[in-house]
Amino acid sequence: MGSPELSDAVLWQALRRGERAALGQLYDRHVGVVYAIALRLLGNVQDAEDLTQEIFLQLGRSAYDPDRGSLRTFLAILTRSRGLDRLRAQRRARASLETWQTEQQQAIAQPPDLLAESLDQAETAAQVRAALAQLSENQRQVLQLAYSDGLSQSAIAERLGLPLGTVKAWARRGLLKLRQTLQPAVEDA
């Protein structure tokens, strides 16, 4: 005759003490129930096998209390809970992937109209050049030194050998003329 079969509670205590043989016996005794629940929930053999392995590997660290119920019931509830967690995680991952794919498809379907943007910029640049051409040479020179070369009005006056008041007046008149010339283009945009 063989040795008497140990109860789940005795094997559980042995497992908690680190006896690996106890895990093997508990596995052999309950793997069918755990795997069946996992397979029914997840619907995939590989996922069910992974979950079954996870349940038994974590069994020694789990919160099972033999006084509260049978190990079989505890394993069934734990398997169901972890299986549902996996399903929720898979659903979130799928939803995230679908959102990303939808965004990518929309980006491909509606590419930015770079040609139109480029044409708009070229048209704006042409309008500014035309407006600058309408300024007097003095106004154009002062505005170019201020905006293209980044000089202050004092530096412009010094460079051109003009009084500061003259430079300020030319800059102001030039800006007013530009505003007046470009106002219709800005309103159309």
Image: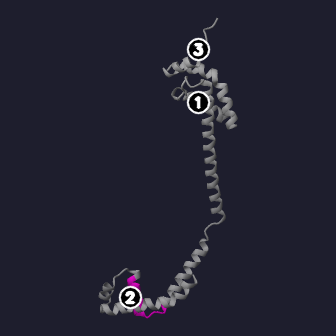
Q: Which residues are magenta?
A: 132-146
Kind of residue at badge 1: Ile
Label 1 close to label 3 by CB (< 8 Å)? no
On screen, residue 46 versus residue 62, left or right, reads: right
> Mark 3 or mark 2: which is in front?
3
- At 59% from the left edge and 71% from the top edge, which residue is drawn? 114
Image quadrant occupied by the N terminus: top right
Could you say which quadrant of the image residue 88 lies in?
top right
Residue 172 appears in view:
yes
The residue under label 2 is: 142
Residue 52 % position (x, y): 62, 30
Q: Of label 1 and label 2, which has the lower sequence position?
A: 1
Q: CA distance from mark 3 to mark 2?
A: 100 Å
Q: Is residue 117 above or below residue 47?
A: below
How busy is the neighbourhood of tag 1: few (under 14 within 10 Å), some, or many (20 plus)?
Answer: many
Q: Of label 3 and label 2, which has the lower sequence position?
A: 3
- At 54% from the left edge and 21% from the top edge, which residue is drawn? 12
- At 62% from the left edge and 27% from the top edge, which residue is drawn? 73
- At 40% from the left edge and 86% from the top edge, which residue is drawn? 143
> Mark 1 or mark 2: which is in front?
1
Closest to the observer, 111 or 89: 89
Q: Is residue 62 magenta?
A: no
The residue under label 3 is: 6
Residue furthest out toward the top: 1
The residue under label 1 is: 55
How busy is the neighbourhood of tag 2: few (under 14 within 10 Å), some, or many (20 plus)?
Answer: many
On screen, residue 114 versus residue 134, left or right, reads: right
Kind of residue at badge 2: Val
